[in-house]
């Protein structure tokens, strides 16, 4: 293939290909493609799935939680979804940062990682009232990130000051979630 596009997914650079393959085995089991022995047969099976079969087989309700509620809110310490794309050293040799640092490096597989800015709005974990105050916003953010430590929570407030988002707590929250 000529390109990889990772939209709205978890790029876990700390997870090996073997572990990512193991955690995503649930998808192969649900599609019944895991019954094939060769990679070519598995690939063929997956490509032969109808759109409905592919979507209905997705592990939305069990780990790796491809459509986790975490995708629509603030991160929680030590809770995450399984990896959908990993830096495996083969298809993707380097992290994005490592690739940019290598001035003469060009990946054989160009990768675009992105998300839809309004995605969180589909089912936000928290909805602010239109007249939420700066104090309410600050308290919410500090409380949401308290398990990460006060310096980290404060850095979130510093990166996402309410004034940057037209004093809209919802818009600031949405940006934190999307980033």
Image (cartoon, rainbow, N blue to C red):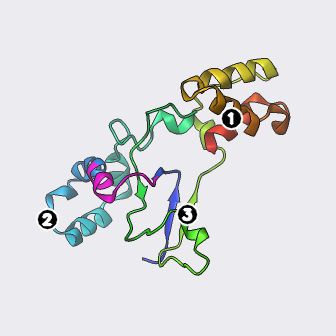
Dot label at residue 156:
1
The answer to if 162 sits in the magenta stretch is: no
Residue 101 left/right relative to 135: left
Secondary structure, mark 1, is helix
Q: How far is disc 2 from disc 1 in space, using C-alphas?
A: 47 Å
The percent position of residue 141, horizontal first and vertical second, equals 67, 26
Which residue is found at the position 60% from the left and 31% from the top? 124
In this rendering, is residue 120 above or below 129?
A: below
Dot label at residue 69:
none
In this rendering, is residue 69 above or below 31?
A: above
Residue assigned mark 3: 96
Q: How many labels does the image show?
A: 3
Which residue is found at the position 54% from the left and 25% from the top? 147
The percent position of residue 155, horizontal first and vertical second, equals 69, 35
| Occupied quadrant, residue 44 | bottom left
Which residue is found at the position 55% from the left and 36% from the top? 72
Closer to the N terminus: mark 2 or mark 1?
Answer: 2
| Occupied quadrant, residue 79 | top left
Q: Which of the two marks, 2 or 1, is nearer to us in this view? A: 1
The percent position of residue 47, horizontal first and vertical second, equals 32, 66
Residue assigned mark 2: 37
């Amino acid at each position: 293939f000529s390109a990889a596009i990772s939209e709205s997914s978890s790029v876990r650079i700390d997870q090996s290909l073997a572990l990512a393959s193991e955690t995503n085995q649930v998808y192969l089991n649900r599609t019944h493609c895991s019954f094939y022995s060769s990679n070519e047969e598995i690939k063929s099976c997956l490509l032969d799935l109808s759109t409905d079969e592919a979507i209905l087989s997705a592990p939305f309700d069990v780990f790796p939680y491809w459509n986790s509620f975490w995708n629509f809110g603030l991160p929680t310490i030590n809770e995450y979804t399984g990896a959908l794309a990993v830096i495996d050293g083969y298809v993707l040799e380097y992290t994005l940062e490592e690739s940019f640092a290598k001035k003469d490096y060009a990946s054989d597989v160009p990768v675009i990682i992105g998300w839809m800015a309004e995605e969180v709005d589909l089912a936000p974990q928290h909805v602010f009232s239109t007249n939420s105050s700066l104090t309410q916003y600050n308290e919410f953010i500090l409380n949401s990130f308290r398990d990460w430590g006060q310096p980290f929570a404060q850095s979130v407030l510093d990166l996402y000051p309410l004034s940057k988002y037209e004093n809209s707590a919802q818009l600031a929250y949405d940006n934190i979630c999307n980033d």
